[in-house]
Every structure is written in C-alpha cells, then in structure tokens.
Image (cartoon, rainbow, N blue to C red):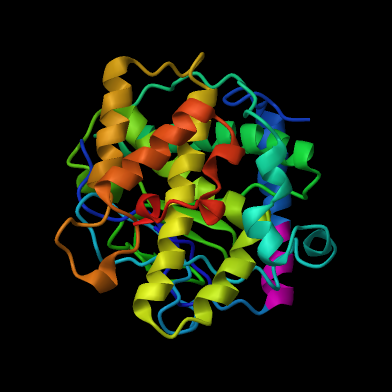
Amino acid sequence: MEPGWDDQDPVGRGATGRLGGWLLPGRRPALYAALTVFVLALTALAWNATTGVPESAGTGEAGAPPYSGSAPGDTGDTGDTGDLRGTPEAGVADARRPAGKAALVANPLYDTGRLSPLPCPAPELDVDDPDSVEGFLNTMADCLDDVWGRQFDRAGIPFHPPRRFFWREPGTSPCRDYPSAAGAFYCRADTGIYIGVTDVVKKWNEAEDGVVYASLIAHEYGHHVQGESGLLEYYHERRGQEDDRDAQNTWTRKSELQANCFAGAFLGSVRVTYPLTDADRATVLEDAKATADRENGPEDERTHGSARNSRYWLEEGLTGQSPGHCNTWAEQDEGLLQ
C-alpha cells in the first residue's frame, strides 16, 4: 500500500489475495526488552501530550492517501503515509534529512551500496496461531531495524525504527481505521507499521510459506525507509499538486514499486541465514504479481503497478540488494512504471 499521510491512503500493498549498536534479532535480553517497553511507554505519553495527533483517523488532502497497503486481489487502497510533522523525531532530525527533489532522485541512501548481510534466521511460523504470526512479524521487524539502521548510518541520515501495531481487534490509527482492505499499511503520521495478524493470513488464502509475510512487512517497512530518508515529504507535496487522478497515480506507483524493490533488497541481503529456495523465490515473485493492479481494472485504481512491473522491481531488489537499484524516481523507461 502507499504510505499514509493524513487521511489520504496510507502506504500499503494492493490487496488482491496473495499466494498463499544493534542487537541480533531474537536475542534481545529480557531486561533490555522490559526497559525498552518502559521507555516506549514514556515516549508515547510524551508524544501524545505534545503533538496533538488525534487518535481517530486523520483528514488529509483529498486523493492523497496517508497509508499504503494491498493484499492479493485488493484494489481499494491507494496508499499514503501520513505527515511526520509533530512526531518526536521532527525538528533537528528533519533538518539533517534530504529534502526537495534531490531527496527523490539523488538521495544519499542510493549511494550506500549493498545492504549488510546481517543474521536473520527464519523463525518457525504456524499461520493458524496468531501468537506465532505475531512472533514471526516481530522477528522480521527486528531484522529490518538492524539492516536498515546500518544503511542509514552509512548515508549519514537520522533513522528511527518504525512503531509496530500488529492488531487482532479493530482500532484506529492517525491515518485510518483498521482492519483495512489490505490487511496491512504504513502510517507516516505516527511512523507505524500496521498489520492484522489474522487478517493477512486470511487475505493471503492461508498461505503457509513465511516468505510472503516476510515480503509483506518488508514492503511496508520500505515506506518507512522512504519517510526516514526524506523523500516521502516531497513526494506527498508534489502528488498533492496534481489535479488529475492519473497524474497522482503515476506518483503513487513510483512509491509502491520502490517499496517493492526495497523489500526485495532486504530479502536478498539476508538470504544466507534466511535462505530462499528456488521455490521460495518463485513464490515471492508470484506474490508480487498477485498484489499488483488488476490487469483490466479501472484507470483510477492503477496505484501499485502492473503485475509485470511489480515483479520486476521486487526482483531488481533481490538481485541488486542495494537502495541504488530501487530509484524509481529517476527511471527513464516509463514502461517500467506503469
């Protein structure tokens, strides 16, 4: 799905009906975890007291989604992420983030080379057990935090890991209510990745292969990477200036296809400890096609790219394993952005 900014569409995967000083993931001590929860609780209290971000869904520009998300066969979410202004990391950190058009086409992140092949052992997954699904998602999020945090250090750009909201009951984010049509989305307003632990399993037709859920969270994390690297703000600004829906969707597709590529780069980088068999690779590439725009769908719903291009950009990331392979904003071949 596209990243969400106020009440535009949050970023997320298209919902069609899928196929079925960092610590190593899964080894964080209990004391560290307890202290982290305590600190996050204090941070949340301070944030709520100082930002004024509503607990109900926001009200953004018409047609500009604050979140992103899509599941196989879904066409309802157009994706937007949400405004970062007012969040705890705004201010000094923002001043050091790339801005303007350069943040899109010449971001320092593109020059950081391949993602570090950090350890990310594939956890066991029982899709019939919500606790197992949530544990799997948290392990993958830990890996993503480590890998992308190191990449941002190389780029010299401030980085804060996203907040995690793995829901089991209906609720509300600053970008939208959930459950969502896609089952997952990213909301820039609170830098949160939202995933329904039972919803995504249903939307992915009870798929048991963990790689599809790893790809899902890596895609939503890709929108967080866009936000932390400074490009989302300029993207939303320019998208909001477009009066024509087709022109808006062109911007949205570039964002979604880049998130696909970022997801592929991550999966490729951890393949030593999270091995992808030929069957896994085929599954995740087919999954990319399943979450793309419908081939004969309405023009105003063409927000995530064609099946061919959705697969192309994921595979580009898998092969290149570098943010520099994911610069959809500078791509000259318009055929790869449809």
- Residue 295 picture location, percent across and down: 17, 56
- The image quadrant of residue 253 is bottom left
Quarter of the image with the N terminus is bottom left
Up the image or down, 27 lies above or below 136; here it is above
Residue at 52 percent across and 47 percent down: it is 222
- The image quadrant of residue 105 is bottom right
Q: Is residue 26 left or right of residue 172?
A: right
Q: Residue furthest front?
A: 332
Q: Nearer the viewer, residue 272 or 252?
A: 252
Residue 47 falls within the magenta-colored stretch? yes
Q: Is residue 169 left or right of residue 251?
A: left
- Residue 282 picture location, percent across and down: 27, 26
Q: Main secondary structure of the magenta part?
A: helix
Residue at 38 percent across and 21 percent down: it is 124
Res 126 seen here: no
Q: Is residue 131 left or right of residue 35?
A: left
Q: What is the total number of numbered labels drawn onto the structure image?
A: 0
- Residue 25 picture location, percent across and down: 59, 26
Q: Which residues are magenta?
A: 43-51
Res 143 seen here: yes
Up the image or down, 70 lies above or below 145; here it is below
Q: Residue furthest left?
A: 296
Quarter of the image with the C terminus is bottom left
- Residue 21 picture location, percent across and down: 79, 30
- The image quadrant of residue 215 is top left
Q: Nearer the viewer, residue 125 or 277?
A: 277
Q: Nearer the viewer, residue 191 or 177?
A: 191
Residue at 63 percent across and 32 percent down: it is 147
Residue 100 falls within the magenta-colored stretch? no
